[in-house]
Amino acid sequence: MKKINIIGGGLAGSEAALQLAAKNWQVELFEMRPAKQTEVHQTASFAEIVCSNSLKSKLLTTASGLLKAEMELLGCKLLPIAETYQVPAGNALAVDRNLFAKNVTKIINDHPNINVHREEVTKLDDELTIIATGPLTTLEITAELNDIIGEEFLYFFDAIAPIVTLDSINDEIVYRKTRYDRGEPDYLNCPLSKDQYYEFIKAVNVAEKHEVHEFESKFFTELDFNFYENCTPIEELARRGKETLRYGVMKPVGLDDPRTGKWPFAVVQLRAENKDQTAYNLVGCQTMLKYHEQKKIFRLIPGLAKAEFLRFGSVHRNTYLHGPNILNKDMSLKKRSNIYIAGQLAGVEGYVESIFSGLLVANILSDEIVKIEELLPETTISGQLWRYLLTPNKNFQPMNANFGLLPMLSEKVRDKKLRKKLYSERALRDLRNSISQVIL
Ligand SMILES: Cc1cc2nc3c(=O)[nH]c(=O)nc-3n(C[C@H](O)[C@H](O)[C@H](O)COP(=O)(O)OP(=O)(O)OC[C@H]3O[C@@H](n4cnc5c(N)ncnc54)[C@H](O)[C@@H]3O)c2cc1C
């Protein structure tokens, strides 16, 4: 019987434990709660859901819906439990978090192949191990990881800017250019006039912010100082003065608008987020504004009036690794191949994505990696999330499921809803096909 240590009984760790135990592995599951809690967990349960109780949409016209459908085909263990304990939430899969987590805990505790150790792990050894300690990984094990991979590949916070689809950007307004034409014109530029800029600043200043958790308040105080300056939320910059953004992330210098031949008053730059350049990141626009406010405010930017958001901005403590630089294809550390990384620590973002990552690592461990590559074609969200974690990217940031990860359809489809439906149909057809061919 093969043996594995799993550190962290959150969403990824619980899924990985149940997957491997079902494949007759002996699982030693280490969870530090309840003796030591993270800043947000409140119970001793496995798979505790820490914030919103929604596992997002079930609709196949959404990326999260597609990811869940793919995970069900792949035999996910936690999603059927979530479905059993779902609460009414329209098209979303929302759960009774207590019942869900209690049930997962019971299944894990009762499983003959899983030994539970209620203790914090602070050292790593040579045994086969999955680390799934999540965004609030403890400092001691972070220090261990630090020694193995090096500080520069370890991030302690997460300042995420929104991502929009290329299709939703108005190319009659936005223009392609790099500052002073140095290098390839990789950026799309949204030009703002004086009035448009001040209207934008005014809207940012009055917008409602996401509440700061107590544990985050220390972190956000630090944001005011030098070290975290590069990820100060835009609303904080706008609060410091109405010109601050125009002299910072929204500076227009060297970005002549081809329609006027002049620099605009301010510019928001967009940078491609994926290889196919179907998704664009609003550079420097990390924010803690509420999602509905982000939608309203970023749509004030010329060229983005109809922006379709693949991801909203956010800022919170989040320990994650620079996967592309430090992970092997099989999610093990290049510098310590007995150690595998799963969950948010590996650079996925979100509950469902974290569960998927536990499922992925368990499958990789129990099967050959070549089979997993065949199993998860590039047309699937699950396959592309995995590839995202490994694809060189100097601006690597945690990623959630979104259609921007998928290669374009062979034909251009203007209708957004239809396009998403076609993405999902293609993904599920290809995944069913690969499952029938790849014998695991
Ligand atoms: C404040 C906050 C709010 C979030 N809100 C949402 C949201 O609304 N929707 C969404 O989709 N995603 C949200 N996320 C992101 C993410 O989806 C969740 O954090 C998710 O739980 C990550 O899953 P995980 O398995 O990687 O980590 P976790 O579920 O956090 O599990 C990690 C486990 O490891 C344990 N652990 C940590 N260190 C050690 C150690 N050294 N030894 C032993 N055990 C250890 C922890 O106690 C925990 O049980 C949020 C994240 C944070 C931080």
Image: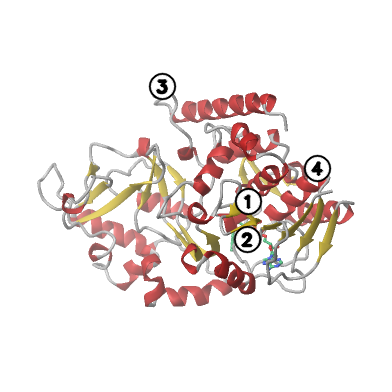
Taking the image as shown, residue 231 lies to the left or right of residue 34, namely left
Looking at the image, is mark 2 or mark 4 nearer the viewer? 4
3 and 4 marks in contact (CB < 8 Å): no
2 and 1 marks in contact (CB < 8 Å): yes
Which type of secondary structure does the marked residue at label 1 adopt? helix
Going from the N terminus, do you reach mark 2 or mark 4 first?
A: 4
Q: Residue at x 54, y 60 (%)?
A: 320
How packed mark 3 is, by other alpha carbons closer than 10 Å (few <14, some 14-19, many 20 or more), is few
Q: Given the image, on which type of amino acid does mark 4 rest? A: Lys
Looking at the rendered image, the quarter that the C terminus falls into is top right
Q: CA distance from mark 3 to mark 2?
A: 39 Å
Which type of secondary structure does the marked residue at label 2 adopt? loop
Q: Position of residue 188 (x, y in %)?
A: 27, 45
Disc 2 residue: CB within 8 Å of ligand 1: yes
Which mark is on residue 134?
Answer: 2
Q: CA distance from mark 2 to mark 4?
A: 24 Å
In this rendering, the answer to whether 227 lies above or below 314 is below
Looking at the image, is mark 3 or mark 4 nearer the viewer? 4
- Point out the residue furthest to the top here: 411
How packed mark 1 is, by other alpha carbons closer than 10 Å (few <14, some 14-19, many 20 or more), is many
User: How is the model colour-coded?
Assistant: secondary structure
Circle 1 is placed at which residue position? 354
In this rendering, the answer to whether 416 lies above or below 243 is above
Disc 4 residue: CB within 8 Å of ligand 1: no
Circle 4 is placed at which residue position? 23
**Image quadrant in which you'd find residue 114:** bottom right
Q: Residue at x 9, y 46 (%)?
A: 261
Which type of secondary structure does the marked residue at label 3 adopt? loop
Q: Position of residue 371 (x, y in %)?
A: 64, 34
Going from the N terminus, do you reach mark 3 or mark 1 first?
A: 1
